């Protein structure tokens, strides 16, 4: 068995489940937003503000940002382990991407909380 | 009729780097031949050309090569497939080249060894044989026919990038052949050996293996079954 410490999941199956579950959340969020924009013509600031003021939408948005973090973490790890063979460079790149994903999550929480 | 070829040449004892060498063959109009026959004729013209072949009928899997960008067996690929275009012949991609069209398949066989390609049965040895019903035997169809030509694994980018960690489509087809065999009792042990982020899960289902398999097998489907077994075991 090949072990790894840099990916998010504890095993191949764990990564497999996490990446698909996060993909489902992201797909639902995207479809919902596209549907909202399509059905709210013309899209006004009040409608947009009203949407993100609702607690369920705030929770849904934060859930989507967590899903981005999970999906990006595992996906980037898979891409980097394919294409970057220098372990130290791969470690640095993995660190940068994961920190960026955490920044998106933190910024998103603060923004959604402020609406 | 003139057949045009460009063949990958590299002899590490003589050449500093690989190069493509052009050849042409005069054949009778309206006739066809297999690429292996053409290679044998080219070898008569240039005895330094090296390639593997044995059974010359698609059974041994020795003459896996890359023809115009697609892996296949030279002995069962007619030159007419290429519709008169120049045929570029290269060794199987991603593997170290020993010489010309001969590649070193050590990594391929190492991955094959990892899946323990033999029946494991810890039950009491039967008097004559381990019986299997026709239905149980049917599960092996589409799996046991693999001839280990390496066309699939060397067409798989996941195998190119991680040949030391990803089992590859051929090895995983064999792994499923033993996982699904009713006579094998080491299912749990076999699955435990595959339950990491590389061995099986590096397959992203792009199906290059299915596209090139000269025996018409479907390793992607077998890998999907292994993933399902791992999933059912984990949740």
Image: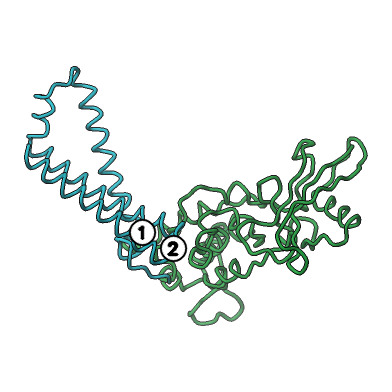
Q: Residue at x 13, y 37 (%)?
A: A57
Q: Position of residue A78 (x, y in %)?
A: 40, 56
Q: How is the image coloured?
A: by chain
Residue furthest front as drawn: B16
Mark seen at residue B231: 1
Mark count: 2
Identify the residue position indicated by label 2 in the image. Answer: B198
Q: Is A54 above or below relative to B193? A: above
Q: Pinpoint residue B201: horizontal percent, then vertical percent.
A: 43, 58
Task: Please report the residue visible at 76 percent of the width from the left and 44 percent of the height from the top.
Answer: B87
Q: Colour of chain B?
A: green
Q: What is the secondary structure assignment of the residue under circle 2? A: loop
Q: Badge 1 local density, few (<14 within 10 Å), some, or many (20+)? A: some
**For the residues carrying marks 2 and 1, which lies nearer the camera in this image?**
2
The reply to whether residue B235 is in sight is no
Locate residue B100 relative to residue A24 in the image: left or right: right
């Amino acid at each position: 068995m090949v072990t790894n410490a840099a990916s998010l999941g504890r095993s191949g199956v764990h990564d497999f489940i996490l990446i698909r579950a996060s993909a489902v959340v992201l797909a639902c969020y995207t479809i919902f937003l596209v549907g909202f924009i399509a059905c709210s013509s013309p899209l006004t600031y009040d409608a947009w503000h009203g949407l993100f003021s609702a607690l369920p939408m705030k929770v849904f948005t934060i859930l989507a940002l967590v899903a981005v973090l999970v999906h990006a973490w595992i996906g980037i790890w898979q891409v980097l382990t394919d294409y970057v063979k220098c372990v130290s460079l791969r470690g640095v790149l993995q660190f940068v991407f994961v920190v960026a994903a955490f920044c998106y999550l933190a910024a998103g929480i603060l923004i959604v909380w402020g609406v | 009729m003139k057949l045009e070829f460009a063949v990958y040449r590299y002899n590490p004892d003589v050449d500093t780097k690989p190069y493509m060498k052009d050849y042409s063959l005069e054949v009778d109009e309206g006739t066809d031949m297999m690429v292996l026959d053409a290679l044998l004729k080219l070898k008569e013209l240039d005895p330094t050309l090296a390639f593997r072949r044995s059974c010359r009928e698609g059974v041994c899997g020795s003459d896996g090569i890359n023809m115009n960008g697609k892996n296949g067996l030279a002995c069962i690929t007619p030159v007419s497939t290429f519709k008169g275009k120049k045929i570029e012949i290269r060794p199987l991609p991603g593997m170290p080249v020993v010489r010309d069209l001969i590649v070193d398949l050590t990594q391929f066989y190492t991955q094959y060894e990892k899946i323990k390609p033999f029946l494991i049965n810890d039950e009491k040895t039967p008097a004559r044989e381990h019986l299997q019903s026709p239905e149980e035997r049917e599960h092996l169809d589409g799996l046991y026919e693999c001839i280990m030509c390496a066309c699939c694994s060397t067409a798989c980018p996941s195998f190119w990038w991680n040949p030391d960690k990803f089992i590859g489509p051929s090895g995983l087809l064999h792994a499923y052949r033993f996982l699904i065999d009713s006579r094998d009792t080491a299912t749990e042990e076999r699955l435990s050996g595959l339950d990491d982020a590389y061995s099986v899960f590096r397959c992203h289902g792009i199906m290059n293996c299915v596209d090139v398999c000269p025996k018409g097998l479907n390793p992607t489907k077998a890998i999907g079954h292994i993933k399902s077994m791992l999933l059912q075991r984990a949740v």
